[in-house]
Image: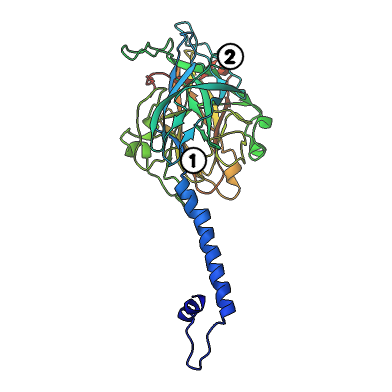
Amino acid sequence: MAKKLINKIFPRKKDNKRAVSPVIATILIIALTVTAGAVVYFVVVPLLQGNGELVLTSSISLKDTNADGSFDTIEFDLYNIGTEFITIKENVSIIIFSTISLAKSQPIHYESSPINIKAYSEYIWQFTSHREYNPQETKTAHIHTTNNLSQILPLSQYEFTISYNSKTLTTGKLYSSYTTETNEESEPEPPLVDYLSTELFLRTAQDDSSTSRVSFPTAAGYSHLLWFLVGIFESGVKNLEDNSIDYINSNGFGLAEDYRPYYGSQDTFSQSINAQTAYQILPYNDSGLYPGCITFNDDTFDPDDNLDWPQRGIVYMFSYIYNPTEEAMDIDVSIQADDAYSLWINGEFQGSGVSGRTSWKTWRTPVRVTLNPGYNIFTVRSTAEKSSWDAQILFWDAGDIDAITSLLNVWPFIEPTSSYW
């Protein structure tokens, strides 16, 4: 039988000689058989065995089940997109980052809420429902904590990791709302104050990354920690230095310099945007090794920032300084951005730049501006053309001595207005 098979595969030539000897042919057949077996074992068998994988298919809902003002339960939908049965481990690792406290009295336009911007803690919560998922099955899961110290405070940053079948699902950094009101039949209570505030963050050259420290523009200055981010627009696109499109405007919200985001805004962006900010406004409380310097990608400027966005794109950044006094203040403002930027303060254009070989790490020539009583908005259009990507603002007292330490960095809860805009 083997000889007939060999004759068919390797017929005799006209001179009655086979192209390959029977011994070699037998070896080749054995090799083909082994290869076919390996393909079946390593490719076909795993496909038949299946592979389970969980994905989040809903927004995260926080609950305050014991009505103590903090969140102790998290609800979300999970979908098994694979073909293998999944069992989730009971313990869930949850990290709670630095917290900004909400003032409890009213009116409160002059009080700040200091934060420990570098602090974070890791806790263990437990699954209380739906730990098993059949292939192509969706369920609403709950995790809970009975430890008061591990509860999530309003206006906190947090993330959690679910483990299953030797895999993990991590949510990334999320933000809790400013209220624990959970009664869906009634309107949520308005916040006790118009905004959430934090003290200005005082910096010297030693508080700046070594990358840009050499050009630090003053002996000591202040930086924003509370930002609103919208992006990434044109994610992954090269050669964006000549791109001047106003993506806030192209999404239907008017000129970028006139846009006034606030905490809880429902504005949704859809044109030319990627998913980094979930197509909405992301309130971002900057922490890390160098607070005040937001590193979007790479660890050149601040290795502790964990945004880790793509290397190229355009992001709009908005931050408010609230002046609680009745006097205007003159300040000097400098910006450092890699790669390109445009800066507006209170809607007035203050300059733009495209980095060269050395200027990407350089603080720019300061501009002198006036901070009016009430809200003042800093608007930055930051563009990354290559790899490392960061942006930061620094301001300090200029000329006559002003009460600059009374200024507050704030997240408004409602759309802010000012008679000076």
Element type where label 1 sits in the image: strand
Q: Residues within 10 Å of mark 1 (few under 14, many from 20)?
A: many
**In the rendered image, the vertical position of residue 12 relative to residue 137, given as above or below:** below
Q: Residue at x 53, y 65 (%)?
A: 33
Of the pair 259 and 323, the residue shown nearer to us: 259
Q: Is residue 287 left or right of residue 180?
A: right
Q: Quarter holding the C terminus? A: top left
Specify the farthest residue to the bottom: 15
Q: Earlier in the sequence, mark 2 or mark 1?
A: 2
Element type where label 2 sits in the image: helix
**Mark 1, residue position:** 341
Q: Residues within 10 Å of mark 2 (few under 14, many from 20)?
A: few
Disc 2 versus disc 1: nearer the observer: 2
- Residue 174 visible? The answer is yes
Specify the farthest residue to the front: 1
Residue 54 picture location, percent across and down: 45, 36
User: Residue 199 falls in which quadrant of the image?
Assistant: top right
- Residue 58 visible? The answer is no
Residue 335 picture location, percent across and down: 54, 35
What amino acid type is highlighted by mark number 1?
Answer: Tyr
Residue 117 picture location, percent across and down: 60, 23
What amino acid type is highlighted by mark number 2?
Answer: Leu
Q: Residue at x 46, y 44 (%)?
A: 50
**In the rendered image, the vertical position of residue 30 relative to residue 284, given as above or below:** below
Residue 206 picture location, percent across and down: 69, 31
Of the pair 166 and 339, the residue shown nearer to us: 166
**Mark 2, residue position:** 149
Q: Are marks 2 and 1 in contact (CB under 8 Å)?
A: no
Q: Residue at x 54, y 59 (%)?
A: 38
Q: Residue at x 37, y 10 (%)?
A: 189
